Image (spheres, grey):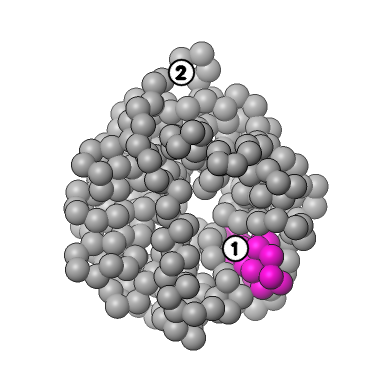
Amino acid sequence: MKHSQSICLFLILSAVIMSATSCKKDDSNNPSGSSSGKIAFSTNRDNGDFEIYVTNQEGSQQTRLTNNAGFNSNPRWNSDGSKIVFASIRGVVNKFNIYVMNADGSGQTRLTDPAIGSADPVFSPDNSKIAFVSGDGPLDGIYIMNADGSNRKRLSSTAFGDSHPNFSPDGSKIIFSSVFTGDNEIYTMNVDGTNRVRLTNETGIDFQPHMSPNGQQIIFISERRGEKGIYIMNADGTSPTRLTALTSPDFDRAPRFSPDGNKIIFSRTVSGSNRLYIMNKDGTGATALPGSGSNSNPDWR
């Protein structure tokens, strides 16, 4: 894949947060259920720039963490909730780079080379590493580095179109999506990049995988059979089950498990309006969180 195509991919992956709308709270169903913790997400509600916010699971206490003229997206918590890693376009460089900050928004620090586009960051379970997607010509692909940005290593190549890395709960594997066979599918590999295993095999795009906290299931987005929705399957790729289904131009994106694995948070675009939803793991009880603007790329801890 050419360098320009790789950087374009980063923009497309984040462009699910495209339009602004007002959101009203639906009190008919408590979206939080038995889960707890905080949710980080990206929104353009204030001045049109996409910023990182955090909220409680009811969506009633929302706090802005970033404030810069740019594009801040893909926030991901570390395991103890003290840090958030995210992708940002800021300053004169029109490329995503990886930043880390404290949970209150302080101490924002760039970790990657501003001349090279990088996106989709995620902490390892022990918080010592960050996996991410980067584009620097023939070495495009999934990378891993220390949590301070040092010791950057390539694990794969976007000659295969690899993206959306996430760690298994024990930190031994990385789950990701790839167009290695010409059709976007879900794969796993060892944390050193070896032992690449394909989990899905369907006509249509499968991407944005996330593994449950107990390591037994994977949720992902699929456009198989002409529908755009969230699926769940066993960690070995068996028993895929559709949880949601929307038809173009509406779609669901960026599903993430709750800390206890019983709920799923995701972004849903309907009639150009992008909102965050929480539903049960079986796909029932989908309820929108309150908040104006275009909201996307949530992460729950």
Between the C-alphas of marks 1 and 2, the distance is 34 Å
Determine which residue is flagged by label 1: 176
Q: Report x, y in % for residue 193.
A: 60, 77
- Work out which residue is located at the far top of the displayed protein and give it: 28
Q: Secondary structure at mark 1?
A: strand
Determine which residue is flagged by label 2: 26
Q: Report x, y in % for residue 194.
A: 65, 78
Q: Report x, y in % for residue 160.
A: 61, 75
Q: Earlier in the sequence, mark 1 or mark 2?
A: 2
Residue visible at 61% across and 63% down? 177
**Label 2 Cα crowd, 10 Å radius (few <14 / some 14-19 / many 20+):** few
Q: Is residue 2 left or right of residue 177?
A: left
Q: Tell me if I can see residue 219 in this picture.
A: no
Residue visible at 66% across and 50% down? 222
Q: Is residue 281 left or right of residue 79?
A: right
Q: Nearer the viewer, residue 209 or 11?
A: 11
Q: Is residue 88 on the magenta stretch?
A: no
Q: Secondary structure at mark 2?
A: loop
Q: Quadrant of residue 20?
A: top left
Q: Is residue 185 on the magenta stretch?
A: yes
Q: Amino acid at mark 1?
A: Phe
Q: Report x, y in % for residue 204.
A: 70, 56
Q: Nearer the viewer, residue 176 or 46?
A: 46
Q: Is residue 24 left or right of residue 31?
A: left
Q: In the displayed structure, would residue 37 be above or below residue 154?
A: above
Q: Image quadrant for the N terminus?
A: bottom right
Q: Which residues are magenta?
A: 167-189
Q: Quadrant of residue 198?
A: bottom right
Residue visible at 43% across and 34% down? 273
Q: Nearer the viewer, residue 290 or 270?
A: 270
